[in-house]
Amino acid sequence: MAQFSHIEYPIKIPYQLRVYFTKGAFELDNPLFRDLACTRESGNRRKALFYVDEAVSQANPELTGQIGSYFDQYADDLRLMDIEILAGGESLKNDPDRLERIYTDIEDHKICRHSYIVAIGGGALLDTVGFAAATAHRGIRHFRFPTTTLGQADAGVGVKNGVNFHQKKNFVGAFAPPFAVINDYKFLSTLPEVHLRNGYIEAIKVALIRDAKFFEWIEENVDALNEFDGETMEELIHRCAEHHVAHIATSGDPFEMGSVRPLDFGHWAAHKLEQLSEFDLSHGEAVAIGIAIDTLYSEEMGYLDSKSANRILTLLKKLHFELFSDHLERRNGSRFPYVLEGLEEFREHLGGLLTITLLKRIGSRFEVHEMDTDVVLKSMNRLKSL
Ligand SMILES: NC(=O)c1ccc[n+]([C@@H]2O[C@H](COP(=O)([O-])OP(=O)(O)OC[C@H]3O[C@@H](n4cnc5c(N)ncnc54)[C@H](O)[C@@H]3O)[C@@H](O)[C@H]2O)c1
Ligand SMILES: [Zn+2]
């Protein structure tokens, strides 16, 4: 009879997921960054290497000088190694050469596990720089400064990072909680409208799966959101970020070992659409369509009542999201469009069992393990006719 012996110990690693909200993080009288960077067994003169999204740097020409002055003020505690400017957006996640450049910088500046890498930019830049930080030396502390609504509300406040491989979204990545996230609302003042709007969709997503009252609040504030009113956007970001962080910290599965991923509601189609459009569709635009498909699917299957489905689509339309894209119809000879491959890719990414989040009410979700292809097609056709 086969025999074995074994050794087993639990390893418990406490993480603290910290998201701060401020305005003007590198103004000289704002001590937040310094206080965070210099507490905790900090030792002397921690090194920091910065990466700034090119669009952010162009829109805020004073930023690099300001960071320089900030570090001069705290020269006893902090040492600025360099501020690298990286062209942001999805092309960054698609380009392995740029990842290699970051590793080279880390090597050249002798950035160690007690240094900081600071990423300032959109979700794509945070994902890329965060991945480099998570993997160089098996993990360097990193600060995230999301500069888009989507980043501040969602992409930047979680524990995931990664890059695309062969155009497949986030194929290579790691779970690595950032040292801290700093949501500096001031950055939003230079963000183009299309990207301001993109953050709204992740807020709608999280409201749909967790919080009916938040959904109502978004409905009530549609006009202010369409006018990009500062205070309203800040509240939306704060509430959305709170939900994300709470979900990650309390769901019992922060590193997604299981197959249930409610925060990815609407994302199986979205990720495929981004790829099919060669990233012409932004993440937010694609998620809006993905949410619309899964909402109608929930209705068609009898899980969600028609009135609620209507409310959801109406809100998306009022916020000027397109609910259909020609990419949904692209097919390769067969009667099935390419976008359906998103289901299989989603399953592969999760590992094992396909698990799709659907709605049973606004604010309440559940999971299914298969999708009826004909009903998905019908849902997409209904969107077209809308
Ligand atoms: N890690 C996660 O958990 C997670 C979650 C959701 C989304 N994401 C990823 O995030 C990415 C989308 O992020 P995004 O919506 O922030 O888009 P993005 O990073 O592509 O940024 C959008 C555009 O705005 C520019 N920009 C950024 N901030 C600016 C500012 N303040 N002023 C002017 N221009 C600015 C960028 O250069 C870019 O061209 C996708 O790759 C998506 O997969 C990651
Ligand atoms: Zn998303």
Image (cartoon, helix red, strand yellow):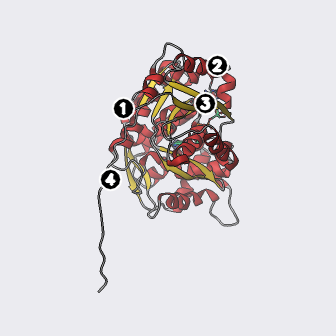
To which residue does mark 1 refer?
Answer: 213
Q: Amino acid at mark 3?
A: Met
User: Viewed as shown, does residue 235 lie left or right of 385?
Assistant: left
| Quarter of the figure with the N terminus | bottom left
To which residue does mark 3 refer?
Answer: 81
Towards the viewer: 126 or 100: 100
| CA distance for labels 2 and 3 | 14 Å
To which residue does mark 2 refer?
Answer: 65
Q: Residues within 10 Å of mark 3 (few under 14, many from 20)?
A: some
Task: Tell me the residue at 45%/36% (across/down).
Answer: 179
Q: Amino acid at mark 1?
A: Lys
> Does residue 35 show up?
yes
Task: Tell me the residue at 46%/45% (across/down).
Answer: 176
Q: Amino acid at mark 2?
A: Gly
Q: Are marks 4 and 3 in contact (CB under 8 Å)?
A: no
Camera-nearest label, 3 or 1 = 3
Q: Residue 216: where, in percent of width, then height? A: 40, 30
| Quarter of the figure with the C terminus | top right
Secondary structure under the numbered disc 3 in the rendered image: strand
| CA distance for labels 1 and 2 | 43 Å
Camera-nearest label, 1 or 4 = 4
Q: Earlier in the sequence, mark 1 or mark 2?
A: 2
Q: Is residue 341 above or below residue 357?
A: below
Towards the viewer: 6 or 370: 6
Q: Residues within 10 Å of mark 2 (few under 14, many from 20)?
A: few
